Amino acid sequence: MERWLIAVVFCILNVGNIASAIESKEDILRVMTNARLNSNPDVVPLHGGPVEVTLSMQLSKIREVDTVRGEVEIIAMVSLLWKDHYLSWLTTTRNESGSSEHGPDRVASFLIDIKKLWSPDIVAYNPVMDPELLSPPLALVSADGTVLYIPNLRIRFRCNLEDFEKPQGTNCTLKYGSWTHDGNKISLKENGVSVYDYEMDPRFDLLGTYAKVEIEYYPCCPEPYPLAKFTFNIKKNSRSIFS
């Protein structure tokens, strides 16, 4: 996630918190009740087409490169952004200045446990074990139905490290996609890999990052299956005192 996007996220969060301070308890409870009533965790909120999920990653740290096992462990924030039209609470009740005097219109956004909402079953396809969640499982829901979920994760995944000590390094790719739904239900976009807050490690050199979405087809099924790939080009730092 780029720096400007992080700033926007924090701005939205702060606006939501400020708004909550001046809104009535009834207004906030009303929109939260609306969300719980209209978002069934088991039903994809289709609205004239597939749910488009924008996926991005902010790499924070490479914790370990295990050349014996062929595994890499990283800390990263994986951002998922989508719109659930059934969560929107925008109304037409507004005063002459264009803002609402009272009611749910005054609620800009709120935070809610992700388990209480439908969320896309986007998972990493090639981890060694289940990623470890390092942050609260909270999603930000905005008045137009936009949902933003940014879990901070410890992820250990497989990588071919044969070229790890060569000058060109090796490419390690994390693959993400829906576990159960094809592209007619969930489509993917990628917003790249950010290294703005990347913590350098003297043992490794990060040479570059890449992101793309590919459409795959399988012999069993005619439906398209989108796959987001986040690639890190890394190599051993030959100057490291840990070599």
Image (cartoon, rainbow, N blue to C red):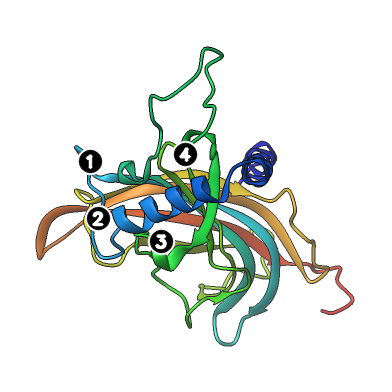
Crowd rating for badge 2 (residues with CA inside 10 Å; few <14, some 14–19, many 20+): some
Is 48 or 159 nearer to us in this picture? 48
Amino acid type assigned to the residue bearing label 2 in the image: Val
In the drawing, what numbered circle is on residue 104? 4
Residue shown at 69% from the left, 42% from the top: 18
Crowd rating for badge 3 (residues with CA inside 10 Å; few <14, some 14–19, many 20+): many
In the drawing, what numbered circle is on residue 168? none
The residue beneath circle 1 is 47
Amino acid type assigned to the residue bearing label 4 in the image: Pro
Residue 218: where, in percent of width, then height? Answer: 17, 61
Amino acid type assigned to the residue bearing label 3 in the image: Tyr
Residue 51: where, in percent of width, then height? Answer: 29, 46
The residue beneath circle 2 is 44
The residue beneath circle 3 is 176
The image quarter containing residue 23 is: top right
Whole-angstrom CA distance, mark 3 to mark 1, is 23 Å
Whole-angstrom CA distance, mark 4 to mark 1, is 23 Å
Between label 4 and label 2, give the one nearer the viewer: 4
Going from N to C along the chain, the mark reached first, 4 or 3, is 4
Residue shown at 47% from the left, 39% from the top: 104
Between label 3 and label 1, give the one nearer the viewer: 1
Going from N to C along the chain, the mark reached first, 2 or 3, is 2
Amino acid type assigned to the residue bearing label 1 in the image: His
Residue 224: where, in percent of width, then height? Answer: 20, 51
Circle 1: element type: loop
Whole-angstrom CA distance, mark 4 to mark 2, is 25 Å
Is 211 or 134 nearer to us in this picture? 134
Whether residues under marks 3 and 1 lie with C-beta atoms below 8 angstroms apart, the answer is no
